[in-house]
Image (tube, rainbow, N blue to C red):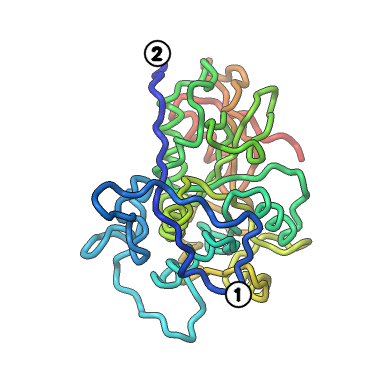
């Protein structure tokens, strides 16, 4: 029997002031809307130095466990100097990049084994991201978020009856444990129309791409979500027009470092970032994507079929093995 309980939204809410945003961020859409204030007399949300202090969407995010916490974000690291380029390993750089994104900048940052360009999901800012990367106008983009907010971006009441919800959730968890992955499914109502697309006759589908549970960029994403008061951001691969997606901070800084409205937040160690994902091919391999907005029939042993919408960094055989372990068959990716 399918579980019909709705998945609650995982929204990060805080007051946005923009006071920490660096000069040069031009916001064609105006300042972002502030989220609801925290309860209590005179409360105004978490301080800028700890933007995710009370946010449910930052639960389990490395580096946001708070003073004395444990996890990858709280291990001892070399302290950055003023001459170091901004990295995901520098809490101050992360905080400032999140403030700049909230003020309208795009941020090119380490994203699992590669690099992504992330911005607020405003239509104008997405169009600017397309001009920066050469993305064709009119193509529907993807969204990203922190691990705890992924399920809330889909409308599970529109999941095809042939696809068991809890088995799909289990598959999602396993794939994000391994690293970056993407899913297309029925979009939740709050996802705006310019980030949804009709697919296989199903209206309003959304593609969610996330870097995986162990990526340091989750700390930046959580801080940016807290600043913008939303629970998702627009994301696309980081590269200039005509170039392949970037795979290291040096390429990202060379490609975007001169743009006035772009900030670069590199991996602290690109080689260590690649080694974190031994089952994934390195950039420029794209992120693999599974679609579950429609049921593609039944495969061997009468298992319901999921569609591999895009072949990418995780091999098709590996994905098929995990899908089978969770009770699904896998339809091969369509020919390009």
Q: How would you rate the neighbour count of disc 1 (Cα within 10 Å): few for under 14, some for 14-19, many for 20 or more?
A: few
Picture layout, residue 48 above or below residue 38: below
Q: Please give the name of the residue rendered at 45% of the width and 34% of the height, measured from the top-left corner.
A: 171
Q: Please give the name of the residue rendered at 60% of the width and 59% of the height, measured from the top-left corner.
A: 117
In the figure, residue 62 lies in which quadrant? bottom left
Picture layout, residue 160 above or below residue 191: above
- The mark nearer the N terminus, 1 or 2, is 2
The residue identified by callout 2 is 1
Q: In the picture provided, is 243 more to the left or to the right than 202?
A: right
Secondary structure beneath label 2: loop
Counting from the top left corner in percent of width and height, residue 56 is at 34, 45
Q: Quadrant of the C terminus?
A: top right
Secondary structure beneath label 1: helix
Q: How would you rate the neighbour count of disc 2 (Cα within 10 Å): few for under 14, some for 14-19, many for 20 or more?
A: few
Counting from the top left corner in percent of width and height, residue 245 is at 67, 60
Outermost left residue: 68
Q: In the picture provided, is 166 more to the left or to the right than 143?
A: left
Counting from the top left corner in percent of width and height, residue 209 is at 55, 45
The residue identified by callout 1 is 250
Q: Please give the name of the residue rendered at 63% of the width and 74% of the height, measured from the top-left corner.
A: 257
Cα distance between the residues tagged 1 and 2:
51 Å
Q: Nearer the viewer, residue 84 or 71?
A: 84
Q: In the picture provided, is 214 more to the left or to the right than 306?
A: left
Q: Quadrant of the N terminus?
A: top left
């Amino acid at each position: 029997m399918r579980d019909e309980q709705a998945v609650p939204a995982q929204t990060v809410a805080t007051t946005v002031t923009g006071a920490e945003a660096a000069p040069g961020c031009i916001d064609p859409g105006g300042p972002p809307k502030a989220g609801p204030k925290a309860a209590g007399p005179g409360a105004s949300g978490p301080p800028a130095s700890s933007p995710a202090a009370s946010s449910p969407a930052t639960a389990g995010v490395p580096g946001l466990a708070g003073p004395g916490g444990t996890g990858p974000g709280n291990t001892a690291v070399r302290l950055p100097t003023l001459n170091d380029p901004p990295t995901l390993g520098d809490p101050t750089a992360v905080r400032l990049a999140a403030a700049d994104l909230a003020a309208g900048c795009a941020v090119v940052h380490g994203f699992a084994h590669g690099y992504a360009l992330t911005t607020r999901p405003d239509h104008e800012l997405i169009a600017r991201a397309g001009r920066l990367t050469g993305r064709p106008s009119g193509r529907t983009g993807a969204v990203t978020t922190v691990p705890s907010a992924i399920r809330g971006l889909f409308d599970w009441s529109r999941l095809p009856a042939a696809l068991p919800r809890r088995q799909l959730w289990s598959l999602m968890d396993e794939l994000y444990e391994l690293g970056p992955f993407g899913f297309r499914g029925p979009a939740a109502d709050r996802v705006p129309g310019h980030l949804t697309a009709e697919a296989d006759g199903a209206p309003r589908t959304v593609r969610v791409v996330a870097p995986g549970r162990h990526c340091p960029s989750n700390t930046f994403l959580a801080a940016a979500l807290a600043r913008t008061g939303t629970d998702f951001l627009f994301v696309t691969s980081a590269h200039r027009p005509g170039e392949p997606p970037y795979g290291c901070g040096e390429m990202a800084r060379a490609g975007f470092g001169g743009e006035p409205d772009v900030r670069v937040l590199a991996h602290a160690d690109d080689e260590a970032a690649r080694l974190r994902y031994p089952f994934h091919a390195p950039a420029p391999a794209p992120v693999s994507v599974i679609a579950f907005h429609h049921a593609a029939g039944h495969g061997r042993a009468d298992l319901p079929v999921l569609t591999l919408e895009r072949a990418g960094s995780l091999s098709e055989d590996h994905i098929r093995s995990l899908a089978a372990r969770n009770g699904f068959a896998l339809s091969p990716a369509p020919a390009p």
